[in-house]
Image: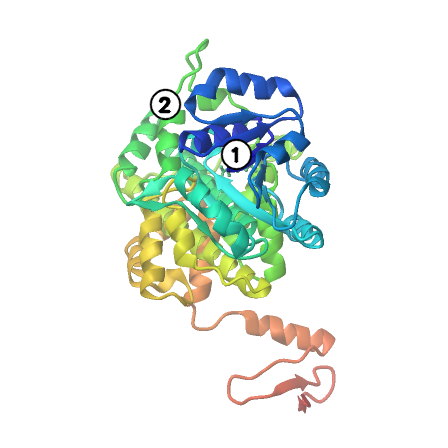
Amino acid sequence: PTATIGLTGLAVMGRNLARNIARHGHTIAVHNRTAARTTSLLEEHGDEGSLVATGSLEELVAAVEQPRVLIVMVKAGEPTDAVVDALVPLLDEGDIVVDAGNAHPDDTTRRQQQLEEHGLHFVGMGVSGGEEGALHGPSIMVGGSDHAYDRLGPVVESIAAQVDGEPCATHVGPGAAGHFVKMVHNGIEYADMQLIAESYDLLRSVLGISPAEVADIFEEWNGGDLESFLIELTADVLRHTDRTSGTPFVDVVADAAEQKGTGRWTVQSALDLGVPVTGIAEATFARSLSGHREQRDAARKVFDTDPDPVEVDRDRFVDDVRAALYASKVVAYAQGFDQIAAGAEANGWDIDLGAVATIWRGGCIIRAQFLDRIREAYADEPDLTTLLTTPYFAQAVLDGVHSWRRVVATAAQSGVPVPAFGSSLSYFDGLRRERLPAAVIQLLRDSFGAHSYQRTDRPGTFHTAWAGDLAEVEIEA
Ligand code: 6PG
């Protein structure tokens, strides 16, 4: 065998990942179910490095040095199961199967247990950055055993994006930690995009400006604290016009946002963990709402009156939206990192949150200057309770809080939906509030179902006889 590593699944992500690996001097054996893709990869890019074409999984396995590392880059779910099942009988103890797709962490855990029975290692590896990232340097979140990372680490660290000389790839933790972190990355990606979309809607609707003018504003924002890949892309896509009609392109694209599921998984997991990821949840629901064509048509017929236009000062409003976007983004990331911490604790994964922020600075879809601030916050205090209260972010939110309130109020007055802005502000207000109305909920629960409550003035668990003499009894532990 001559190859350091093998890869099966040469659709665009797999193909680009293989080229990236070859370009970095590693010999890589490649395989695809239909051989034509393997042939075309070798024909078109065989001169970029050492690519070894193989015609079957048997040949692929035979081509790689032991302990073998075999990357599987096929569709999540059943296609991945099929390839993994076919590989298992061909492998030897200590070999490593790497799933580089967007798998559900529970599937990764299941596959890991299956392979462990055969003395094999299964790695769930999150790869972010789309097609371009796969080729030029993605961000890579690796889960699984130390044995697997010893073998895989040098390759992935060499092909990942590099920021300040540090690779955007790391062993985030054992088990399904890699795919869990990638899942939350995508959830944050949903929140980021929803906040951008709300900002666009506000600027356009309240100020009555064109998409190209909104693009200019985003371009300017990209020069400041908000600098990020997605803000930069937003300026580009908003400036584009339809080739045939000359209409702003954003106006000819159907306004129903699709999803492949990672955002939904993030919210489902957050519900199970009890972590309020309101930004991600609202972003996911906003996509669902956008797709409910019939309900939207029905509602527009009945409620077609627009609220009165709201007069605002243009420059001040633009700056308010910028500040609201930044504060809401801080909340969404604080929530996402809370979820990673909770997932790590529930599964015994011991994830270094600072390392996660570090590898998200480059390569991935949510890459942003902002992540350097998060990295610093965890470097100062690894066991942070919440990012929101660290000096830099607390100051950012305090600086923006009045803008944030004005924007949410203006949105409500103008009838522009801002679920992510609004819920992020409510989350912030919920956290900082001296007394929450949760006491009312406790009283109601105790009143209709004797569910009991605790008191602020002394320890213990109590129940009041609401239907009787209103006597309070202490409930034995
Ligand atoms: C990435 C992206 C990538 C993909 C999303 C899209 O990190 O490179 O997140 O994984 O673009 O899965 O997800 P939706 O189709 O659900 O928006």
Mark count? 2
**Would residue 346 be seen by someone viewing this image from the given angle?**
yes
Q: Is residue 155 above or below residue 258?
A: below
Q: Is residue 186 above or below residue 340?
A: above
Which is more foreground, mark 1 or mark 2?
A: 1
Residue 392, position in %: x, y? 29, 58
Looking at the rendered structure, the kind of residue marked 1 is Ala
What residue sits right under mark 1 in the picture?
3
Residue 223, position in %: x, y? 25, 38
The one nearer the camera, 171 or 78, is: 171
Q: Quadrant of residue 26?
A: top left
Residue drawn where x is 41% and y is 33% of the image: 25
The one nearer the camera, 163 or 366, is: 163
Looking at the rendered structure, the kind of residue marked 2 is Arg
Residue drawn where x is 50% and y is 47% of the image: 151
The answer to whether the residue bearing label 2 lies less than 8 angstroms from the nearest atom of ligand 1 is no
Residue 239 shows which numbered tag?
2
Residue 154, position in %: x, y? 43, 45
Q: Is residue 150 above or below residue 429?
A: above
**Would residue 275 be seen by someone viewing this image from the given angle?**
no
Image quarter (top left, top right, bottom left or bottom right) of the C terminus? bottom right
The mark that comes first in sequence, 1 or 2, is: 1
Residue drawn where x is 30% and y is 32% of the image: 219
Distance between the alpha carbons at the discs numbered 1 and 2? 46 Å
Query: Among all residues in the image, which is located at the extreme top?
Result: 244
